[in-house]
């Protein structure tokens, strides 16, 4: 799709092994000061994670396509990764595509037609991503891996920011990392929920390329500073990978 800011995932993955990505989650920004809060990220505004919740798939409601369009206009060169926590994602994808997101990520639990939907997203020129809840076995996404640009491993139950990290989910990251190498696949490994400075190094060491962080970034009055701290901690994990 024209205007889509996408990332060559093999490039970023290779880069990712040297250079982990911090993806600030808009959910923890002040909803009445989003643009200002995002601008305060400085260079870390280069990747914005946007949580879309429908009140059905998760017990919370957030944003729609208009907000993503506004973000794209305000931050034309940022990677916009739209995390759809919605039932029947096939009904919503067409509404989000005109906003030129870089990635549209939906949940494997939310549709019986994940394979078809990934094909449709990719065909539209947008990066295609699949996500899995903490209680979902990693094998659920294996048949889909050749079709995805990004796999989002949820490390909390989706719906809210500020929850505690579930350590067992890292076994899924490791399994996906191994499978990517074994099958010579090409996708980014993203983790979302409960990411903190204390944990960032381990996440990268276990295989994550992209760390989504909401409260760890925006609870600081200087979000660029907290994102930088996360980034430096993540780099530390890489040196021990
Ligand atoms: C939760 C969302 C997350 C959320 C993470 O359902 O998918 O993206 O913003 O927030 P923290 O980093 O505070 O756990
Ligand atoms: Zn999310």
Image: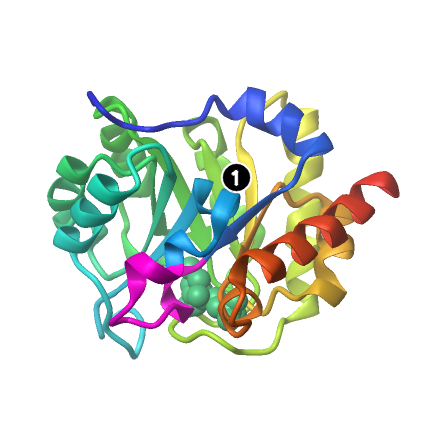
Q: Is residue 101 above or below residue 160?
A: above
The reply, left or right, for residue 34 in relation to residue 25 is: left
Front-most of residues 80 and 109? 80
Q: Quadrant of the C terminus?
A: top right
The reply, left or right, for residue 127 in relation to residue 201 is: left
Q: Which residues are magenta?
A: 25-37
Question: What residue is shown with label 1?
Answer: 142
Q: Where in the figure is residue 29, as x and y percent of width and height?
A: 38, 68
Q: Is residue 77 visible?
A: yes
Q: Is residue 157 above or below residue 48?
A: below
The reply, left or right, for residue 117 in relation to residue 45 is: left
Residue 90 lies in the magenta-colored region: no
Q: Write down the quadrant of residue 11 in the picture.
A: top right
Q: Is residue 45 above or below residue 119?
A: below
Q: Where in the figure is residue 61, as x and y percent of width and height?
A: 23, 73
> What kind of element bears circle 1?
helix
At 45% from the left and 74% from the top, the residue drawn is 161
At 22% from the left and 51% from the top, the residue drawn is 89
Q: Where in the figure is residue 72, as x and y percent of width and height?
A: 24, 41
Hey, which residue is sitting farthest right in the picture?
Answer: 240
């Amino acid at each position: 799709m024209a205007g889509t800011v996408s990332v060559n995932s093999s490039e970023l993955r290779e880069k990712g092994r040297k250079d982990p990505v911090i993806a600030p989650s808009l959910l923890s920004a002040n909803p009445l000061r989003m643009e200002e809060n995002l601008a305060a990220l400085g260079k870390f505004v280069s990747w914005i994670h946007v949580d879309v919740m429908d009140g059905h798939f998760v017990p919370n409601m957030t944003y729609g396509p208009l907000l993503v369009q506004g973000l794209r206009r305000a931050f034309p060169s940022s990677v916009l990764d739209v995390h759809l926590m919605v039932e029947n994602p096939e009904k919503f994808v067409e509404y989000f595509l005109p906003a030129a997101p870089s990635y549209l990520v939906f949940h494997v639990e939310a549709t019986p037609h994940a394979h078809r939907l990934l094909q449709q997203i990719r065909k539209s020129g947008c990066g295609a991503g699949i996500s899995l809840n903490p209680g979902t076995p990693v094998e659920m996404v294996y048949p889909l891996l050749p079709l995805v640009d990004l796999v989002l491993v949820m490390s909390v139950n989706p719906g809210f920011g500020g929850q505690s990290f579930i350590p067992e989910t890292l076994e899924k990251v490791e399994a996906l990392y191994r499978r990517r190498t074994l099958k010579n696949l090409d996708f980014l490994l993203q983790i979302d929920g409960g990411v903190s400075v204390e944990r960032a190094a381990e996440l990268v060491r276990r295989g994550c390329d992209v760390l989504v962080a909401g409260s760890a970034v925006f609870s600081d009055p200087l979000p660029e500073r907290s994102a930088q701290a996360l980034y430096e901690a993540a780099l530390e994990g890489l040196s021990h990978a």
